[in-house]
Structures are given as C-alpha cells and as structure tokens.
C-alpha cells in the first residue's frame, strides 16, 4: 500500500513540475503545437467527411445488426457482427470507422468558419446535413452501444464547444454536473453492456467505491506492484501503446495489454480491467519511468493549454474543437490501459487533421500568437459574432470574463 501511494504521489508531483517548467517556456514559439492547433476546419473537407460518414453508415450499419441493435446493448452489436463472419479486429475497425467520422463530421459542421465571400451556400448545406448527422450520432455514438468513455467524450465535447460553457460561470456549473455524473451515474452504464441484466440496485457511494469494478484503480495499482515484485520490470512494454496497430501475427512478442496482464496475475476470470497510467509507467521502469512519463505529460498539457489560450479568438480551429475532446479523453488515458485507448485516440486526432487546413498562427514577442483578427463561425439561424470580450489593460489582448 505504501508503494502504491508513493507511485501516485510521484506521478502527481512530476506532472506539476512538468507543467510549471513548461509554463516558463510559454513565451517561446510553439513551433509544432501552435501551427497544428491553429489549423482551421475546411468547408470542402468538412462536406466530404459528412458524405463519407453517411455513406459508411449506410454500408456498415446493416452488418452490425441494423439500427435496432445499437439501442439494445453492446453485446447485441458484437453478436450481430460476429454472426456475419467478422473477426473481433474487423468488428473493432467497423465500429470506429462508424463512430469517429460521424463525431467529427457533426463537430466540424457546427463550427465550420465563415468564408470571406459569405456563407450562404455553407449555411444551406449545413441546414440539410445537420439533422442527418445528429441522427447518425445518436445511433452510432450513444452510451448503449458504445463504450462509456467514448460516448461521454462525444457528448461533452459537443457541449463544451458552445460559447456559453466556455465562460467561467457556465464552465463551473457544467464541471460540477459532470463530476456528479461520473460519481453517481457512470457505474449504472454497465446496465447496457449485456443483454442479460441484473436488477438495478441503488447503493451508497461508499459501497460503489469499494465493491464496483469500475473503481478498481487503487487495487490495480497494488496488483501492479505485485507484478513488478514477482516478474520484474518490462521496459519493452512501453513500445506496445505507440505500436498498437502492428498485428500480433507480425509481431510475435508484442506486449500484452497491461489490464489483462494484471488480471491474469491476480487470477481474475474477468480481464476487462483498468491499468492506470501510474502503474503502466511503473511497470516500464519503476519510479524513474513514472517521473519521466508524468513530467512530459504535464509539460505537454501546459503547452497545449497555452496554444489554446492564444488562439481562442480564431473560429473553427483544432484548438477550439480538439482540445476539449482531448481533455475529456484523458479520463480513459489516465484510467488505462493505454493499449486499449490508443486506437480511438489516434482516430480522434487524425480525423481532425484530415478535416482541417492550414491556419494562421503567429508568435508575437512574449505575448503569444494572437490572430490578426477574429474569424467568425458560420452558424445555423443565429448571429455569427461572439459578444465582445474585455481587454487586458497592459497588452490589449482578450481576457476571460
């Protein structure tokens, strides 16, 4: 127990130090992250993605059991695909090929920037495509047929992309609601995992935290410490997450999913368990690996936040759309295992890059890359201009209300 607590504290301290050190370098140009996050949604690419998402749905949904299966359970969707002769890897590819493009198509559709010649054509197409994409996301990204972490990422990203929830008051209210949902509602999402369902029993939070497998992080930390003591550290395990796409038939010694490894070591029959980032990094190289991983994690998070802050006046950028998605996706990244979450994360980033084009990101002195002028979004049925923001008395840059 002492070692497990020390691992958690070491990771949190390293994260804080990494974020602070990255903050000192915020005045220097973000040569990589800045231009990437300043990429703007391209109307042409957005329309192509919308058509692609709709076409893929027409082709793949019947093979997944039809519309009805998506509102039954995840088990029903998997069994319908298996009945059609698909292997598990093929089912996973089909599922994410449906889910990620549908999500990005709707997100880009809501926030595509207005072109210099007006947005009448874009607005007309958006009116036509918006109900179709909303309906498609209800089908393929609902919490009944999709993992809870992905359905939550989709819903929360769409919500927090709204200007009202980006203001301090709206953000605080929404954050409190999310925290309540994670603690109280999240465990009951398991009700939709299988067709055979036990009666719903409402129990206290204390009992949920101590008996529900959804809250197994600390127990998994202790199991990981036991694995390290009995089997030793495995530095090559760090290659598994970044090379997740390599088939095991090609890579015979591909590292095992850490959650499965921990479950096997503990003798559990059920292996769909978490592997918190703390214990994953510890199994790679002990405390030095924990400090390194969380230090880099904190530095990267701080730099992303800085770029997001500097580009907040630009409409339709990856900073506005992708950063909230990554923020919510961190719930599954931290919970683990990394091997299971890298595929959805890669799709989340790559589809965003494909639907966007080069943007305007400029570093000016020590104040960061402020855009020359704000860019309006093409919106449906409302004015396209945000309300004026207050200006800092020293630099003249916008500040939060």
Image (tube, grey):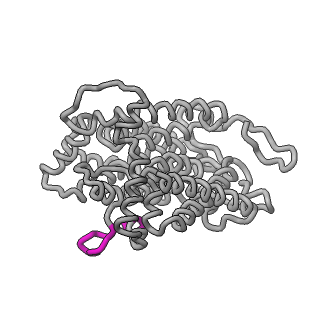
Magenta: predominant secondary structure element? loop
Judging depth in this view, the residue of 235 and 133 nearest the camera is 235
Answer yes or no: is residue 203 visible: yes
Q: Percent position (x, y) of residue 28? A: 73, 65
Q: Nearer the viewer, residue 345 or 113?
A: 345
Residue 364 drawn at (x, y percent) = 78, 61
Foreground residue among 398 and 16: 16
Tell me which corner region of the image, top left, top right, bottom left or bottom right, holds residue 303.
Answer: bottom right
**Residue 360 seen in the figure:** no
Q: Quadrant of residue 36?
A: bottom right
Residue 384 among magenta residues: no
Left or right? Give the position of 123 relative to 138. right
Image quadrant where one finds the C terminus: top right
Query: At 64% across and 52% down in the image, what residue appears?
Result: 305
Look at 74% across and 61% down and name the residue there: 24
Drawn side of residue 206 relative to residue 167, left or right: left
- In the image: residue 188, left or right of residue 38: left
Which stretch is magenta?
241-255
Residue found at the far front of this picture: 2
Instruction: Write the residue at 74% across / 38% down.
Output: 389
Residue 320 lies left or right of residue 57; in this view the side is right
Rendered view: 295 above or below 110: below
């Amino acid at each position: 127990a002492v070692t497990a607590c020390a691992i958690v504290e070491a990771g949190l301290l390293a994260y804080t130090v990494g974020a602070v050190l990255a903050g000192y370098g915020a005045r220097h140009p973000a040569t990589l992250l800045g231009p990437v996050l300043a990429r703007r949604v391209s109307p042409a690419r957005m329309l192509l993605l919308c058509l692609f998402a709709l076409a893929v749905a027409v082709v793949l949904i019947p093979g997944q059991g039809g519309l009805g299966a998506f509102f039954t359970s995840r088990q029903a969707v998997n069994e319908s695909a298996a009945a059609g002769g698909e292997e598990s890897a093929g089912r996973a590819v089909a599922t994410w090929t449906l889910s990620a493009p549908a999500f990005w198509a709707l997100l880009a559709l809501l926030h595509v920037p207005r072109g210099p010649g007006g947005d009448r054509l874009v607005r007309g197409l958006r009116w036509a495509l918006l109900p179709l994409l909303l309906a498609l996301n209800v089908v393929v990204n609902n919490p009944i047929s999709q993992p809870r972490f992905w359905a939550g990422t989709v819903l929360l990203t769409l919500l927090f992309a709204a200007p009202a929830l980006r203001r301090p008051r709206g953000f605080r209210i929404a954050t409190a609601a999310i925290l309540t949902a994670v603690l109280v509602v999240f465990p009951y999402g398991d009700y939709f995992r299988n067709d055979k369902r036990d009666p719903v029993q409402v129990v206290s939070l204390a009992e949920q935290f101590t008996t529900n497998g959804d809250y197994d992080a600390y127990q998994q930390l202790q199991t990981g410490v036991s694995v390290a003591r009995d089997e030793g550290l495995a530095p090559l395990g760090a290659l598994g997450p970044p090379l997740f796409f390599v088939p095991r038939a090609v890579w015979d010694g591909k590292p095992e999913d850490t959650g499965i490894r921990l479950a096997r070591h503990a003798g559990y029959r059920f292996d769909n368990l978490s592997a918190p980032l703390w214990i994953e990094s510890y199994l790679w190289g002990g405390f030095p690996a924990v400090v390194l991983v969380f230090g880099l994690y904190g530095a990267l998070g701080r730099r992303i936040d800085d770029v997001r802050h500097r580009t907040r006046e630009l409409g339709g950028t990856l900073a506005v759309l992708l950063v909230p998605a990554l923020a919510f996706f961190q719930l599954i990244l931290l919970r683990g295992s990394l091997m299971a979450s890298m595929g959805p994360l890669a799709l989340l980033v790559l589809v965003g890059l494909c639907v966007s084009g080069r943007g305007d990101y400029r570093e000016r002195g020590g104040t960061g890359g402020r855009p020359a002028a704000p860019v309006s979004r093409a919106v449906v049925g409302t004015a396209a201009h945000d309300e004026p923001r207050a200006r800092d008395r020293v630099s003249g840059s916008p500040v939060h209300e």
